Every structure is written in structure tokens, then in C-alpha cells.
Image (cartoon, grey):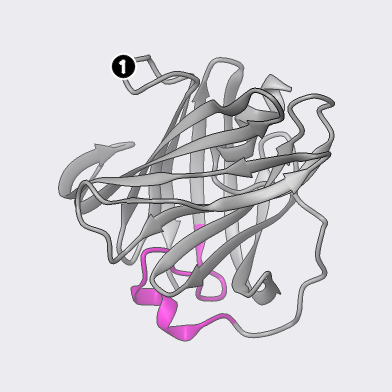
């Protein structure tokens, strides 16, 4: 289970086959969004820490699919341990990823919807999100906007106006209650997308178990 949960959001995009995509053109205005998805755009990431040491590339396909009222743009992912599709969604100023989760008791896979950024939030604002259900369990991904306007260097490149958010992966367990299973620190830049993700099993004082860093990208 641990590896599955780690891969769940190490790169904010996972292989999933729950829905068929439609051959729609992606939203052209997304070039100026916090997650551009213009056709042919790509992002290369390096994943390191723990058991992870690989590079992976995501490429926007120009295709979309609608799941539970949210329009997702479809990206292909290559490299790492798998090749497949990733999903980035947008609705009412909120940015989502559609990822593969696991049941806490059996390890069976089910799909999760993660809200990782509310562009209308201010530092300190929080949000809730019902992420999905599987094998009798439900998942939540509450989040918080930590800071705006940051300056940081990732893989040798300096970015300004960086937004930092935190997302907690929670499972609701019968007779036990809510269990936090992972903490994800997202760093996002308008017109670029996600530049860095840190994963921890405990709070922010723990050293990251995995780090995903943007090493190269091109927005078409």
C-alpha cells in the first residue's frame, strides 16, 4: 500500500483507466492559467527521495473528459515506472488532478479527485474536498493556501510569484474516523503549472519522503 500511496501524488498525475476520453480541443485560455494545457505543451520532472529516482514527462494532448461535472484535460505521461494518462481539471477557479488511490484495508485501487489550488484563496484560507470512495471507504483532500508571491529556485531555475499550497490525503475509516495518510506541499506558478511537490507522511517538520521538481517545460 505504501508505494501506491506515494505514487498517488508524487507527480500529481497517475495512470487511470476509469473513463473514456473525448477528442475535444483543450481550453485555449489555459495558457495563462495556473495549469496550462495547450496542446503539445510538456513538462519534465525529476522525482527523488526514498525509493524514487527517475524522470518523467507529461505532454498535453488537447483531449478532454468530463467527470462528476469537472472538465479534465488529458496528458500523456512517459518515463518512470509507467506510461499512461494524467488528468488536470478546472472549475470555478479551482484546479484538480484525477489520480489513482488505494483502499486502506485491501489495497484495491479506486479513483481520487484532488483539489490542489483555489486561485481565489488568500494566504491562510482553507478548503475541503470530497475526493472519492472505494471498497466502503471515503477519501478527503482538504487543502490550505500557505503563501503567495514567493521566490524560489527549482532545478537551477528561479521562479517568482510562486503559490504554495498544502493538501492532506485523508481516509474516513468506519469506527475509527479520519486518518491522515499523506501531506503534499505544492508549488505552482501562473503560466507554468506545478514546479515542485514535496511528499511527507507526517507534518511539514519531517524531511520529505519524495520530491518532484520541474526540470524543463515548454508551453505552446
User: Residue 35's spot in the image, x, y percent?
Assistant: 43, 64
Residue drawn at the location 54% of the way across and 41% of the way down = 11
Report the side of 27 relative to 68 (left or right). left
Q: Is residue 113 visible?
A: no
178 is higher (above) or lower (below) than 63: above
Q: Give left or right: position of 147 versus 35.
A: left
Q: Which residue is mark 1?
A: 205
- Is disc 1 placed on a helix, strand or loop? loop
Please name the residue shown 52% across and 59% down the image.
Answer: 96
Q: Determine the image quadrant of residue 82.
A: top right
Confirm whether the magenta stretch covers residue 35.
yes
Q: Main secondary structure of the magenta part?
A: loop
Which region is colored magenta?
26-42
| Position of residue 18 measured from the top left corner of the image (x, y, whole percent) | 82, 58
Front residue (pair 169, 75): 169
Front position in the image: 34 or 110: 110
Does 196 appear above or below 114?
above
State whether residue 163 is above or below residue 31: above
For label 1, the crowd category at 10 Å Cα-Cα, with few meaning under 14, some 14 to 19 and many 20 or more, is: few
**Which residue corresponds to the image point at 23% horizontal and 39% vertical from the top-left?**
153
Query: Image quadrant for the C terminus?
Result: bottom left
Place of residue 159 in the rendered image (x, y in percent of width and height, measured from the top left):
22, 50
Quadrant where the image shows the N terminus = top right
Amino acid at each position: 500500500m505504501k508505494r501506491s500511496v506515494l505514487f498517488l501524488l508524487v507527480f500529481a498525475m497517475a495512470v487511470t483507466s476509469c473513463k473514456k476520453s473525448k477528442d475535444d480541443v483543450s481550453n485555449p485560455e489555459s495558457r495563462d492559467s495556473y495549469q496550462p494545457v495547450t496542446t503539445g505543451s510538456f513538462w519534465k520532472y525529476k522525482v527523488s527521495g526514498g525509493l524514487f529516482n527517475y524522470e518523467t514527462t507529461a505532454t498535453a494532448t488537447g483531449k478532454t473528459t468530463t467527470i462528476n461535472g469537472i472538465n479534465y484535460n488529458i496528458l500523456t505521461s512517459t518515463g518512470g515506472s509507467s506510461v499512461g494518462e494524467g488528468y488536470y481539471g478546472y472549475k470555478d477557479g479551482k484546479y484538480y488532478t484525477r489520480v489513482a488511490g488505494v483502499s486502506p484495508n485491501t489495497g484495491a485501487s479506486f479513483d481520487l479527485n484532488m483539489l490542489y489550488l483555489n486561485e481565489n484563496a488568500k494566504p491562510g484560507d482553507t478548503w475541503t474536498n470530497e475526493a472519492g470512495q472505494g471498497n466502503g471507504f471515503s477519501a478527503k483532500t482538504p487543502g490550505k493556501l500557505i503563501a503567495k508571491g514567493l521566490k524560489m529556485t527549482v532545478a537551477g531555475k528561479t521562479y517568482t510569484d510562486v503559490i504554495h499550497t498544502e493538501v492532506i490525503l485523508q481516509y474516513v475509516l468506519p469506527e475509527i474516523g479520519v486518518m491522515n495518510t499523506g501531506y503534499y506541499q505544492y508549488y505552482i506558478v501562473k503560466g507554468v503549472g506545478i514546479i515542485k511537490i514535496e511528499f511527507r507522511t507526517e507534518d511539514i517538520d519531517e524531511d520529505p519522503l519524495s520530491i518532484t521538481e520541474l526540470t524543463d517545460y515548454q508551453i505552446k
